[in-house]
Image: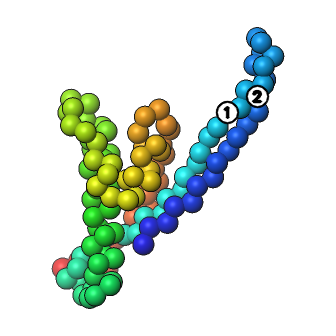
């Protein structure tokens, strides 16, 4: 399954012109995505089959959301609500936020 770890940061800053104390808010979210699985290879059954399907769906939906945000010509709504993962990450990957994505990918020994 996926894991999200969120840190909320508040900083008190003094405005140089007015001397007023301002509070700035920030949020850092670390996300560990589970890898997608081929159902034929994993031979999942029962609860594991449902979880595998949900993992694959959320990764697919994240890809759709990122593609939708990158395509400025489309005016379709961004499909944030299609998975719980994209709902939780909505404010981190859209709007005025800064997003950095790191991917650790390793090849499988064999893929039939």
* As drawn, 39 above or below 57: below
Q: Position of residue 81 (x, y in %)?
A: 32, 51
Asked if the residues shown at circle 1 and circle 2 are in contact, with their CB atoms under 8 angstroms apart, the answer is: yes
Secondary structure of the residue carrying tag 2 is: strand
Q: Earlier in the sequence, mark 1 or mark 2?
A: 2
- Of residue 96 and residue 104, the one placed in the foreground of this image is 96
Name which quarter of the figure residue 76 lies in: top left
Q: Is residue 106 left or right of residue 100?
A: left
Which numbered marker is on residue 13? 2
In front of the other: 79 or 66: 79
Image quadrant containing the N terminus: bottom left
Q: Position of residue 80 (x, y in %)?
A: 33, 48
Q: How is the image coloured?
A: rainbow
Q: Residue at x 38, y 59 (%)?
A: 84
| Left/right of residue 95 with respect to residue 64 in the rendered view | right
Residue 75 location, x and y as percent? 21, 32
Q: Residue at x 49, y 37 (%)?
A: 97
69, 80: nearer the viewer: 80
Q: Residue at x 27, y 59 (%)?
A: 60
How far separated are the C-alphas under marks 1 and 2? 7 Å
Query: Is 111 or 44 nearer to us in this picture?
Result: 44
Residue 72's place in the image compared with 100, above or below, is above
The residue that mark 1 highlights is 24
């Amino acid at each position: 399954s996926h894991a999200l770890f969120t840190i909320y940061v508040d900083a008190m800053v003094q405005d140089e012109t007015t001397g007023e104390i301002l509070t700035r808010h920030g949020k850092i979210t670390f996300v560990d995505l589970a890898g997608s699985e081929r159902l034929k290879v994993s031979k999942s059954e029962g609860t594991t089959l449902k979880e595998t399907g949900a993992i694959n769906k959320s990764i697919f939906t994240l890809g759709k959301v990122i593609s939708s945000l990158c395509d400025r010509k489309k005016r379709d709504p961004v499909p944030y609500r299609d998975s719980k993962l994209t709902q939780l990450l909505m404010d981190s990957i859209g709007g005025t936020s800064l997003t950095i994505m790191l991917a650790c990918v390793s090849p499988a020994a064999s893929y039939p």
